[in-house]
Image: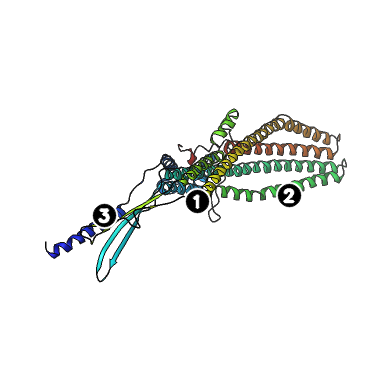
Amino acid sequence: MNSNQSNSRPRWRQGSVLALAAALLLTGCKGTPTKGEKEARQQAQAVAATYRPRAQRPVLPALTTNSGLEHFLAYAMLNQPQVEAAYFDWAASVEGITVERSLPDPQFTFQMDIANVVTSVMPGLMQEFVFPGKLRWRANLAAAESQAKYYAFESAVLQTALAVKRAYYQLWFLDEIIRINREMGDLLGELERSARGRNAVGKVTLQDVYRAQIEQDRLGAEIANLEDSRNPLRAQFKAALGLTNEQPDPPMPGRFEAATLEPPPEQLLATAFARHPRLKAMEADVRRAQASLALAYKAKVPDLSVGLMVDAQANPTLYRLPGGPATVSLPIWRDKIAAEIAGAQAGKRAAEARLTNEQIMLTVDFAMKSYDYREISRNLALLQNQLVPKAQKSLEIARSGYLASQIDFFNLIDAERTLLEFRLSEVKERTRRELVLAELSLLIAGVPPANSPTNSPR
């Protein structure tokens, strides 16, 4: 064999080794997804199809005064930055599952021995192998954390829907309150004219006229304050829709849509325990703590690092294990391992306690909101069926009695105030009713609106 052939063989072997290493690094490898990772990715794809199809914000509903409440809710859920931030936090955590279940990156090594010339060229690869089971539990831990992030996203959706409904109902019933005050203002104007007429013929003094004017002035100031209160409520409504200060104000809904309680009251608490997002997040936190404990027990087991180097200059080819035959971690610090296990056990118990506390608080919240709903229903029935009709008749009798000089103007004004108070109380109770129903459905039962992106299969 001539010298050219003998020199080309090492170069050929060297090139082959380098080509193989380059192929491994450039083509890459794929790990095996865990069950939790597969489920998380399927859920993320289902939600993204509605919330961010093709990684883009979908076309938002066009809002007009004729738009229904469901259109405003859909707009807010797709546009609200708070919801978007929670969504991408969750999306990032889904990707984190893949990171946690993957082996560490292999290391490319390279060594050369040089005297007067290059005597050896030794490329190689090293890989750390985590003990079987550790990566799986790391993935389970990351999956549980990801699920908690999902429920934070769901909570943000529900909070946004509630913010829209709260501003919507308050704005609508504010107009009702202003309308009632203006009607009573018109009535006071009629009473003042009656007082002036009776004063002109000497039947009453100017005191009645002044009393009517005082009531009109007081009511006028109240109406001005109410009209001014529209501005912060409109700002709240705009903010709930996710609109910035630079964007145009949204149109106000032109029709009122009353809230409905879904599911029925007798199923409400069971539904809350089945799907309340804060409760489900606590359950995911318990699973995370369980995975953390299992992973802590795996700390007792060593990990292995192995590698292989090839001396492409040697003839025959020389293979060498870099740094010795292999490296093995030695988990000898038993107090450290015991502390990790004890800490994980304490974390698990804390997570279980938080879950139990959340269940207790959910039961209490349900009891309080249910009581509020029953109280409001009783108050509304009393106002609508008894107090307002009787106050209306009382005012009519007082007005006739005043014109017949049977009662004084003070009693007439008192009857007018009583009717106004009852009518305003009715509107306030109706407002409370709508808000309590929204809270029971959204915050207690955790039932999102029909067009919510969280309605994707889980």
Q: Nearer the viewer, residue 135 or 37?
A: 135
Find the residue positioned furthest to the bottom: 116
Find residue 178 and report its image quarter.
Answer: top right
Quadrant (top left/top right/bottom left/bottom right) for the N terminus: bottom left
Q: Secondary structure at mark 1?
A: loop
Q: Say what amino acid the circle numbered 1 marks.
A: Trp
Kindly identify which numbered label has been placed on residue 333: 1
In the rendered image, is residue 410 in sight? yes
- Disc 3 marks a residue whose amino acid type is Leu
Report the residue marked by disc 2.
221
Residue 374, how many percent across, how many down?
Answer: 67, 31
Q: Secondary structure at mark 3?
A: helix
Q: Nearer the viewer, residue 27 or 1?
A: 1
Of the two numbered discs 1 and 2 in the rendering, the one whose residue sits closer to the viewer: 1
Q: Residue at x 16, y 62 (%)?
A: 6
Left or right of 291 on screen, residue 428: right
Which marked residue is nearer to the observer: mark 3 or mark 2? 3
Q: Outermost residue toward the top? A: 266
Q: Residue at x 34, y 47 (%)?
A: 30
In the rendered structure, which disc, 3 or 1, sits on the residue that comes first in sequence?
3
Which numbered tag is attached to residue 20? 3
Give the residue type at disc 2. Answer: Ala
Dividing the picture into quadrants, the one containing residue 403 is top right
